[in-house]
Every structure is written in structure tokens, then in C-alpha cells.
Image (spheres, rainbow, N blue to C red):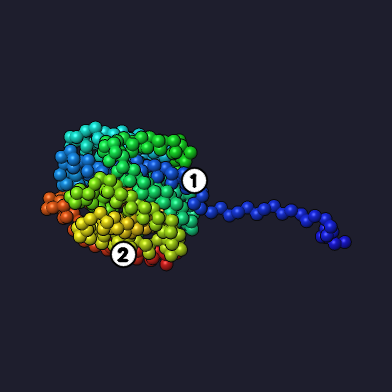
């Protein structure tokens, strides 16, 4: 007798084969992490382009503004080196919640005070708060994705986050033009508090079970020569970016352009920055993220150096678009590489070191730019040459180290 059923009998229904789990733009966890990143970013993007204008209007010089703004990044850079310890003790949810509340209070305080000490305290408070928020989010994205899909996961996160760089300046500039500069700060503070509702479903209330000596993890991460060189390249990249974000608004005020135009400049930059994220992740997964480092570093240095030759809104808006494209390749690239050369239990500390290198760059850039501004409003842009040269040198050494490591595997 045949072992097969008669032809008249219905064929047995095969259960549908379970699809392979892959990270995609629709992945709920990555989307929620991106939404949290969007809200955290936009709360500050409302005021980033108008902060120098606000300080200028209440009597601060360009050199003083550069020094004050650099304090925010200095505070971020220092706290981020210890964010692994903080998250290990408090847990991700409490760390993020504390950062959001302090961020809101500090943003409101900045426009309620005029004294240098008061402004400095407010900016330091914002820096410390934001330091406690970014690294846990980056670590969560790294832990969500596999090595093969990490580029796409980070590109989705950075795309959603960078939409804030697009919308925030335009909204903040419009609010400032219609209701006054103070209102932009209050709106940013309100959004920071609103973000509390988003972090609950993506974080745990208790501290992480795995505690691999988080206090020492930052220095253990830096012992890796690949990570150290990548962080140095990232440091100079963000020093260039810090000069741009601080002194381009002051340069535009010098050209007698409006606050709304300043907001649109950062909106154009944010649009191009956002559009680059998704293709960057796919390209990085295919050809390797290290191939995208040099275009970003060289591009931003060259555009910053050209700024003094641009004397109208149109040319500056085109420069902002190019600045956004060049910079948009960097976040996905560096976070992928830092995660690759770090152990899973050290992700938060590793991302803290990475973020610290960038934020210390944001400290060094405006600080050096403020000193250069004593010679005139154009002088800070000349720093693009030495900072760009150091950034390229570190990038080349980091790329070579990454390729050697890949060959040894």
C-alpha cells in the first residue's frame, strides 16, 4: 500500500514557517528608542541656534559666549566618563528620568537669570543632565541589534533622532520670533518632561543585573588603541562642529540676518543630516563603517573654513546643507565601530567614552573659538585648518587599526 494519501484526500496543511527575526525600520523597540532620542534632541534643538543670540542681546561678547557655551559640553564630557557607574547604581530608567527633570529645570533657569554665574550654572546643569541620557540609549540600540544588522538599527535610531535637528531649530526660531526667545527655552523644558512618558516602556526600573566594574570600564575601553584613535578623531570632528554651532549664528547676526533665518539654517542642516542616516547604515553594513569616516571629517572642516567667504543667507543655507550631509555619516559609523570593539556588558561605558570624546570636542571648539574671537568674528573659522588636520590624522590611524583587526579575525 502506498504511504501517500489518496489524491482525493485534502493535502495536509503545513504550518507557516516562522520568519527570521531581523532589525528593520518597523522594529518597535528601535522605534521607541528613536522616539526617545528625538524628544531628548529636540528639547535642546529648540534653543541651540538662538542661545548665542540670547546671550549676545543681554550683553555678552563673542568671547564670553564661546566660554560659557563650552561649559555645557565640558560638563557632559566629564559626566559621560562615569555614566556606566551611574546607570549601574540607579538603573537606566532612573538615570534617564533624573536627567530629563534636571534638563528641564536648567533650561528654564538659563533664561531666568542674567548673571554670568547663573548662566554658567544653568549650562552646566543642562550638560550634566544630557550626559546621563544619551549613553544609555546608545547602549540599548547596540544591545538590540546583531553585528550584521547594527548599522541598520543605528541608522533608524539616528534618523528618528536627527529629525529633531531638522524640526527643532525651525520651531524654536519661529517661537522666538513670535513670542520671544524665552518661550523657546520654556517649550524645550516642557518637551523634556514629556519624554518621561516615553522612556517607561523601553527601560527597566531596577539596576542592571550585570555589573562588570562600570567605574573602571571607561578606562578599560580606552586601553583599546582602536577605540582610543576613533575617539580622538571624533573629538576633533565635534570641535569643528562646536565652532559651527556657536559662531555661525553670531556671524549671521554680524551680517544682520534675522533670528528666523538662523533657525532655518539649522533646519536645512538638520534635514540633510536626517536624510543621510538610513542610507549610511545600509552602506556601512555592506562596505564597512570605517570607509565613511574621512568624508565626514574632511567635509565639515572644509565647509567651516569657507564660511567667512559667504556673505548672504543663500550661500550660508547651501553650506549648511553640505555641513549636514558630511556630518550625517559620522554618528552611525562611530557607534557601530565602538560597539564592535566593546564587550556587551561595557556598552554603556563604551558609549559614554564615545559621547564624552564628542562633547569634550564641543567644549574645546567653542572655547578655542572664543579666544580666537578676540581677534574678530571671522577668526574662529580659521581653526578649521588645524582641527581638521588633527582629525584626519587620527581618523587615518583609526581606520588602519580597524582594518588590521578585521584581517586578524
- Quadrant containing the C terminus is bottom left
**Residue 100's spot in the image, x, y percent?**
36, 37
Q: Quadrant of residue 67?
A: top left
Q: Which numbered tag is attached to residue 396?
A: 2
What's the residue at 43%, 54% (across, down)? 155
Tell me if residue 277 can be seen. Answer: yes
Residue located 63% across and 52% down the image = 18
Where is the N terminus found, in terms of image quarters? bottom right
Q: Work out which residue is located at the far left of the displayed protein and give it.
A: 375
Q: Is residue 256 above or below residue 101?
A: below
Q: Which mark is residue 155?
A: none
Tell me which residue sits at (37%, 42%) in the image. 40
Total residue callouts: 2
- Residue for point 42% across, 42% down: 36
The crowd level at tag 2 (other Cα within 10 Å; few <14, some 14-19, many 20+) is: some
Q: Is residue 317 left or right of 160 when viewed as pictured?
A: left
Q: Secondary structure at mark 1?
A: helix
Residue 249 percent across, percent down from the top left: 23, 49
Quarter of the image for residue 326 reads: bottom left
- CA gap between label 2 and label 1 equals 35 Å
Work out whether residue 346 can be spotted: no
Say whether residue 15 is left or right of residue 361: right
Q: Which residue is mark 1?
A: 29
Which callout, 2 or 1, points at the residue further toward the start of the chain? 1
Q: Looking at the image, do the residues carrying marks 2 and 1 touch, with CB atoms under 8 Å apart? A: no
Between disc 2 and disc 1, the foreground one is 1
Instruction: Give residue 231's position: percent from left, percent from top.
Output: 31, 55
The image shows residue 360, relative to residue 295, as above or below, that is above
Disc 2 element = helix
Amino acid at each position: 500500500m502506498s504511504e501517500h494519501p489518496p489524491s482525493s484526500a485534502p493535502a495536509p496543511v503545513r504550518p507557516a514557517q516562522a520568519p527570521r527575526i531581523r532589525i528593520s525600520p518597523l522594529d518597535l523597540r528601535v522605534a521607541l528608542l528613536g522616539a526617545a532620542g528625538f524628544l531628548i534632541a529636540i528639547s535642546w534643538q529648540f534653543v541651540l541656534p538662538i542661545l548665542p543670540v540670547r546671550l549676545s542681546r543681554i550683553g555678552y561678547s563673542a568671547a564670553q559666549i564661546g566660554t560659557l557655551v563650552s561649559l555645557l559640553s565640558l560638563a557632559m564630557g566629564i559626566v559621560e566618563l562615569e555614566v556606566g557607574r551611574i546607570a549601574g547604581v540607579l538603573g537606566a530608567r532612573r538615570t534617564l528620568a533624573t536627567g530629563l527633570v534636571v534638563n528641564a529645570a536648567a533650561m528654564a533657569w538659563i533664561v531666568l537669570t542674567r548673571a554670568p554665574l547663573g548662566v554658567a550654572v544653568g549650562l552646566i546643569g543642562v550638560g550634566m543632565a544630557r550626559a546621563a541620557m544619551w549613553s544609555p540609549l546608545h547602549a540599548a540600540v547596540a544591545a538590540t541589534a546583531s553585528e550584521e544588522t547594527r548599522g541598520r538599527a543605528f541608522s533608524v535610531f539616528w534618523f528618528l533622532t536627527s529629525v529633531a535637528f531638522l524640526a527643532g531649530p525651525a520651531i524654536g526660531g519661529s517661537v522666538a520670533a513670535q513670542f520671544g526667545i524665552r518661550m523657546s527655552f520654556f517649550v524645550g523644558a516642557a518637551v523634556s518632561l514629556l519624554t518621561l512618558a516615553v522612556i517607561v516602556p523601553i527601560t527597566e526600573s531596577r539596576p542592571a543585573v550585570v555589573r562588570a566594574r562600570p567605574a573602571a570600564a571607561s578606562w578599560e575601553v580606552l586601553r583599546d588603541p582602536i577605540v582610543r584613535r576613533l575617539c580622538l578623531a571624533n573629538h576633533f570632528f565635534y570641535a569643528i562642529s562646536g565652532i559651527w554651532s556657536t559662531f555661525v549664528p553670531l556671524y549671521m547676526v554680524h551680517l544682520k540676518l534675522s533670528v528666523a533665518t538662523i533657525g532655518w539654517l539649522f533646519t536645512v542642516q538638520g534635514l540633510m543630516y536626517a536624510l543621510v542616516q538610513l542610507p549610511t547604515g545600509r552602506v556601512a553594513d555592506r562596505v564597512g563603517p570605517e570607509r565613511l569616516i574621512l568624508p565626514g571629517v574632511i567635509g565639515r572642516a572644509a565647509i567651516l573654513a569657507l564660511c567667512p567667504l559667504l556673505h548672504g543667507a543663500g550661500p550660508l543655507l547651501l553650506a549648511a546643507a553640505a555641513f549636514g550631509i558630511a556630518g550625517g555619516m559620522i554618528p552611525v559609523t562611530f557607534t557601530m565601530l565602538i560597539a564592535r570593539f566593546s564587550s556587551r556588558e561595557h556598552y554603556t561605558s563604551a558609549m559614554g567614552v564615545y559621547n564624552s570624546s564628542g562633547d569634550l570636542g564641543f567644549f574645546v571648539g567653542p572655547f578655542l573659538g572664543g579666544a580666537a574671537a578676540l581677534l574678530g568674528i571671522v577668526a574662529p573659522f580659521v581653526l578649521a585648518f588645524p582641527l581638521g588636520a588633527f582629525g584626519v590624522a587620527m581618523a587615518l590611524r583609526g581606520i588602519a587599526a580597524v582594518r588590521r583587526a578585521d584581517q586578524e579575525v
